[in-house]
Image (tube, helix red, strand yellow):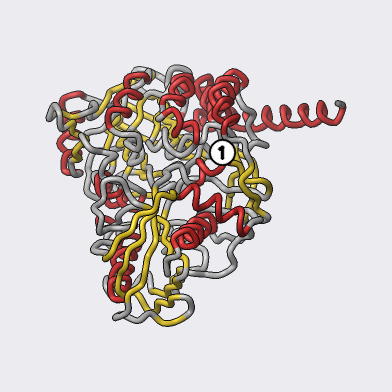
Amino acid sequence: MFPNRLLLLVLVFIGAKALAEMATSSKEVQQGQGTDSPRRVEVAILHFTDTHAQVKEHPELFWSDDHSREELTQAGGFARLYTVVEHMRQQYAGRVLLLDGGDTIQGSALGVFSKGKGLVPILNFLGIDGAVPGNWEVVYGVDSLKQVTAMLNYPMIAANIVDQATKQLAFAPYKIYERGGIKIAVIGYTDPEVPERQPPSYSKGFSYLRDDVIQPIVDDIRNNKKADVIILLSHIGLPKAVELSSRIKGIDLHLSGDTHERTYTPILKNHWVVESGAFTSFLGKAILVVEEGKVVDKKWELLELRAERYPEHTELKRIIDKAVAPIFKKLSRKIGETKDPLFRYGVNQTSLDMILSDAIREATGADIGFSNGFRFAPPLVPGPILEWDLFTIYPVNMPLRVGEVTGKQLWDWWEKEIEHVYSQDPKKLFGGWLPRPSGLTIRFLANAPRGQRVKEILIHGKPIDLQKTYSVGACIREGDPENRVCRIPDIKNPRDFTIDAHTAVKNYLKKFGPLREPAQLRVIAEDLPTIVRSQYYRR
């Protein structure tokens, strides 16, 4: 008992010390700007995004910009995030705005089995002021999203989602808040390519407008609503957010989401652009100093919500544990084991998705297996793999399909996919990261012109034959035509399997476990570092 009590005291001391440091930091900001007055007010804008239903603490990988330092430690969870939020609310009494950047209800078993509704008591406890729906918010269908939204005690904000049934905007395009006498307008804008990025059935009932809707709203708010601060809360990815900010005038702060980027230093265009990581492992804090209706100074900090720095809020932790317990009990069966940490932090390839593509190829007997370039899921640490983990790693479970394509089709498809991820024009970026192959190795130049990037493709170690036909196995996206698999169009002789991705992975774990991190490189950008964890910061 004594060692446990001693450990508890140490953790409490460390948490208290971290919060004290936060208080000191906040005081320094106030002292540097002067105390609030009717003419000069500091407001705190708190931002989290892409939590992917990771409600509990979990392993997280932190790294330095040059990847020379990596730390795998416990972090995150809404109970820990709430501790920091509450401290900010005490420090900036009545002058805090908490915003959610989207992709909140998808990414864990709790999200899947409740269709997002199981997160509602947790999200309502946080005291969120507003949220933009992310591209995965429609994963359970439009009607389900409407039901979840109706249960939340804060609004969804999106200026570009149209409800096809009413021909009206599905959500308010913006909302104006008052904090400390300051009028703060928040405009929501989400990815207009959702119907193409996600399986088409997910967003059936919604249509999406492009970003030309934003500037008129900004102008109207600035000229007619007399807002002191205008914030753009977007879910389009950091590269696109930076490009958009170079065109939009009148914004004071652009809070980006979707690409899970960790912006420690603001990117300056016409205004600051920042993104706040993912998985409840981070909280972005912007302090805006407003004087006579204008932002005259600001400060940004991206807080790493490490377990050793911040304690969890007791009451919210109890609510989370209660929500998770019955689902975890159903999914506590061990299905495998890993000897190494497995990650999904890579633009080109990741160990978690290499295992998925290997499992798909094994299950289908195809020449090549493919997985999409997913971004969701924190690391998996050495030890048993439970069914619960399967719903974190692959929360979107789909049946499998095999089809035939020529080598030339594969070559051209890779050129298109590389353009989607590495285009020099941010407006041409599309979806997640590169596809994850099994049975195939590709070498390319990320910075070469479009259509000239692929240098070599090997199929099981042999150069691809452009005239030869190869079989390709992947998941079926609900709503896709029969001649498409893993975004590869015009396949021949499609054959569907009753087996799904989860079963394929379980069988693979049983046959080939315990897992080790795959050593080979399969997707190699010859003009980039071996490890590429960011689309924006790669250059």
Q: Is residue 470 above or below residue 389?
A: below
* Residue 454 rendering spot, x and y as whole percentages: 35, 75
Q: Which residue is at a point 32% across and 36% down the rendered structure image?
A: 138
Residue drawn at point x = 66 percent, y = 46 percent: 384
Mark 1 lies on a secondary structure that is helix
For the question of whether residue 269 can be seen, the reply is yes
Up the image or down, 270 lies above or below 10; here it is below
Question: Residue pushed farthest right?
Answer: 2
Q: Horizontally, is 366 left or right of 340 in the view?
A: left
* Towards the viewer: 251 or 1: 1
Instruction: Between residue 169 and residue 463, name the one nearer to us.
Output: 463
- Is 195 located above or below residue 466 in the figure? above
Tell me if I can see residue 265 in this picture: no
Spot occupied by residue 313 in the image (x, y as percentages of width and height): 60, 23
User: Measuring 30% from the left and 74% from the top, which residue is drawn there?
Assistant: 406
User: Viewer-proximal residue, 413 or 462?
Assistant: 462
Task: Give the residue number, with chain letter if any, for mark 1.
Answer: 388
Q: Position of residue 480 (x, y in %)?
A: 26, 50
Query: Along the horizontal axis of the image, is 260 left or right of 513?
Result: left
State the image coordinates of residue 402 (x, y, percent, origin top left): 36, 61
Location of the C terminus by quadrant is: bottom left
- Could you say which is closer to the camera, residue 511 or residue 300? 511
Q: Amino acid at mark 1?
A: Trp
Query: Splitting the image into 4 quarters, where does residue 145 fall?
Result: top left
Residue at image position (15%, 25%) is 224
* Label 1 neighbour load within 10 Å: few <14, some 14-19, many 20+: many
Which residue of the protein is positioned furthest toward the left in this rendering?
Answer: 167
State how many labels appear: 1
Q: Which image quarter: residue 180?
A: top left
Relative to 321, say whether 77 is above or below: below
Image quarter where the N terminus lies is top right
